[in-house]
Image (tube, rainbow, N blue to C red):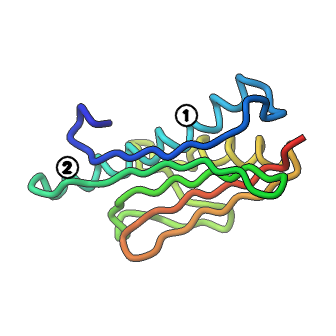
Amino acid sequence: ARHAGLAVSFDVVAPGDLGIDDAKLVSLVSNMLDNAVAGATAVMTEAPDRTARVSFRIAKKEGMLYFFCENDCNESSLVKTNDGFLSSKKTKKKGLGMSIVSDIVKEHGGVCRFFVEDGVFHAQAMLRLE
């Protein structure tokens, strides 16, 4: 992401044992970040003089693990559906990334939320720690 010219920030505070399978954790984080990088890169493609931002945080609080991923986005290019957003990739079909995140989160008794506000796409997930 930084190599692509994006401004990237990470703030990760997590216990050693999260109670989630490593492969699922990697899938959750990588899907959130992949979507964020794609969205922010699209901003820079349309406005090359602009530096787009991606931020990712993990925090633990009161038996819960929170994931926050935010990225600058082109709000006008996002198409909202009943259960998410259409992919901004060439296919313009519903992407799998957010569905994968949602499935993993639900499997661990959590909830997730995806929304756009003031030109920033927010992906938030909350998991119960076991």
Tell me the kind of residue under disc 2: Thr
Q: Residue at image x 47%, y 38%?
A: 34
Give the percent coordinates (x, y) of residue 95.
Answer: 56, 45
Label 2, residues with CA under 10 Å away: few <14, some 14-19, many ≥20? few
In the structure shown, which secondary structural element does the residue marked by tag 2 occupy? helix
Q: Which mark is residue 30?
A: 1
- Taking the view exactly as shown, the residue that stands out farthest to the top is 23
Residue 114 falls in which quadrant of the image?
bottom right
In the structure shown, which secondary structural element does the residue marked by tag 1 occupy? helix
Quadrant (top left, top right, bottom left, bottom right) of the C terminus:
top right
Tell me the kind of residue under disc 1: Ser
Give the percent coordinates (x, y) of residue 100.
Answer: 68, 40
- Taking the view exactly as shown, the residue that stands out farthest to the bottom is 118
Upstream in sequence: badge 1 or badge 2: 1
Determine which residue is flagged by label 2. Answer: 45
Q: Nearer the viewer, residue 98 or 81?
A: 98
